[in-house]
Image (cartoon, rainbow, N blue to C red):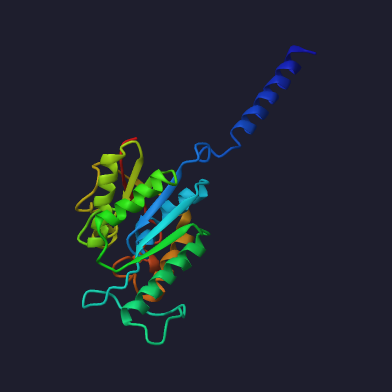
Amino acid sequence: MKKLDLFIVLFAAFILFLSTFYSVNPFNAHHEKIAFIIPHADDETIGASGIILMLLNSGYKLHFDLMTSGNGIGSNTLKVHNYYNCEHQPNESERGIKGRIREDSFKQVMKIINVTDYKLHGIDDGALNTDQVFSVMENLYLKEGYKIFYTTTGDRNPDHHACHEAMKRMHEKHPNLKYRQFPIYYYFYDHGKTKPTQSLFNNFIDVGVDVYAGTIKEMFQVYYNIHTILPTFYPRSNGVISFSPERIYYDKI
């Protein structure tokens, strides 16, 4: 065999080896498990819909813990619309009906992104505390092996703040894990330019998620339909902001 022919054969064999080696998705190679701790139904969509889709598209298996039912009733809370005809008991309270509708909307979004691994804790809106969130997160790590956690940054909402403080406590006790937080209200203030008031860490990155714009709009539309996301607050839902990066705060690996 001529040297040139031998070189071509060896080169082709090398390329075949590389293609076989790298055919395994590098994101799957380490089998790390990712858990999203969500204070209210719609927080995952407002703060991290594109990031969630990016992770799913990369082969990660995601788990979601929805901590509250979002059943708050009062002058500062939104009145939801039962757009998806969620069933409820005839004599059920207004608070109970609202919680069912919001939890059902979360299930609708999970269907859109083809996620079945989630848990609804049903804690009253505004009553979530740091101990409850910390217990959920630590159990996910110690009993189920989750090593990457996402939740909301701290802000004036008490349920968001509880998740933020629980993440800080986890970081102090288990610094070997990976922690990520995403803001909720920054879309409202300045379309992504304003930092949250209590970010867990100082470093951050804006993640480009334009490629997922179509599915992001579907997710937003679920909450837009039941009136928990208003276009004046989070305009991505009605097309005013069709393409936008998402901001994520993270610990140094």
Relative vertical location of residue 155 with respect to residue 18 in this rendering, above or below: below
- 170 to 65, vertically: above or below: above
Across and down, in percent, residue 210 comes to: 44, 53
Image quarter of residue 170: top left
Question: In the rendered image, which quarter contains the C terminus?
Answer: top left
Q: Residue at x 31, y 49 (%)?
A: 181
The answer to whether any part of residue 57 appears in the image is yes
Q: Is residue 87 left or right of residue 252?
A: right
> Residue at the spot x=46%, y=41% of the render?
32
Residue ranking furthest to the right:
1
**What residue is at 42 percent from the left and 56 percent from the top?**
64
The residue furthest front is 143
Query: Looking at the picture, how far across and down is residue 101, in whole percent?
Result: 40, 75
**Quadrant showing the N terminus:** top right
172 sits to left or right of 44: left
> Which of the 4 image quadrants contains residue 5?
top right
Q: x, y (%) of residue 224? A: 39, 72
The single residue placed furthest to the bottom in the displayed view is: 90
- 245, 250: nearer the viewer: 250
**Residue 69 or residue 110, whichever sits in front:** 69
Q: Position of residue 172 (x, y in %)?
A: 25, 40
